[in-house]
Image (cartoon, rainbow, N blue to C red):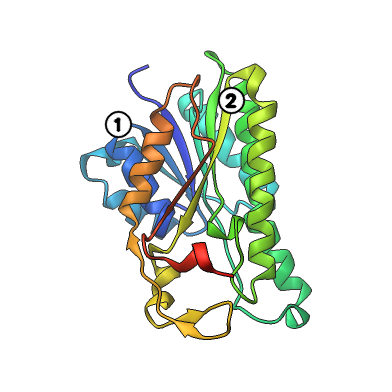
Amino acid sequence: MSTKHAVVTGAGSGVGRAAALALLGGGWSVALAGRRKDALEETIGLAGEAASRALAIPTDVGDPKAVNALFDRIKAEWGRLDFLFNNAGGNVPAGPIEDLAYEDWARVVQVNLTGSFLCAQAAFRLMKNQSPQGGRIVNNGSISAHVPRPDSVAYTSTKHAITGLTKVLALDGRPFDIVSGQIDIGNAGTPMTARMQKGVKQANGEMKVEPVFDVAHVGSTILMMANLPLDANIQFVTIAAAKMPWIARG
């Protein structure tokens, strides 16, 4: 096949935008999924001539009907799917566990964990039944899949759970040439990490400015993972600002 086909969720900004642009630049056709059509189209507008291989598909990944519609569109447009980057995610302001409203907890779980499950489930069905069979799923785990920040019970819990999802997909996909890996990102330079420049709370309670790195390097890492043959897999990869203090968070 001269062109392979990918879905990137949360493609309207940040890590998802960088991944979508890297894949488009690498010759892939890419369906960009996210809640805001204007943001998706803005990403496509940055792709230059590769924009002709992009589809903007507004999608709430926490909504099963919306996810099914996304993958039905992929099947109708392309007939197959070779790569899914499960990137969409959300968070709530940091705060003590006793003050976290159930509604805020549920919203983070619905997007970060349930959304990743729903997209992986739909991708798995498509990859299992297409010919040639197989494909690759990469989940965005985050440094928080390893160690938490203070006051982050909802986000950290979902990101630890993503690691379990990654492992199950990798195991259950073996008979069908469906491989699964995880990218754990620390302080990529996106709107989400702009607060790092002003100082964020550390484990000992102090506020500290943290370094960030160019999010384009995340995109190139995703492209490398996507381009691997299906008999090889990067199971887990961590990419972070070199001087990020996560190794010593405790």
**SS for dot 2:** strand
Residue drawn at x 42%, y 75% is 196
Are dots 1 and 2 in contact, CB under 8 Å? no
Instruction: Classify residue 22 by image quadrant.
Output: top left
Residue on which disc 2 sits: 178
**Residue 11 coordinates in the image, percent (x, y):** 44, 52
- Closer to viewer: mark 1 or mark 2: 2
How many circles with numbers are drawn on the protein? Answer: 2
Q: Who is closer to the viewer here, 37 or 148?
A: 148
Residue 100 appears in the rendering = yes
Q: Is residue 184 above or below residue 207?
A: above
Q: Which circle marks residue 27 in the picture?
A: 1
**Residue 78 coordinates in the image, percent (x, y):** 46, 26
Residue 129 appears in the rendering = no
Which amino acid, by three-letter code, is at mark 2? Ile
Which amino acid, by three-letter code, is at mark 1? Gly
Q: Residues within 10 Å of mark 2 (few under 14, many from 20)?
A: many
Disc on the earlier residue, 1 or 2? 1
**Residue 119 coordinates in the image, percent (x, y):** 62, 42
Residue drawn at x 57%, y 28% is 179
Q: Is residue 187 left or right of residue 149?
A: left
Q: Who is closer to the viewer here, 202 or 94?
A: 202
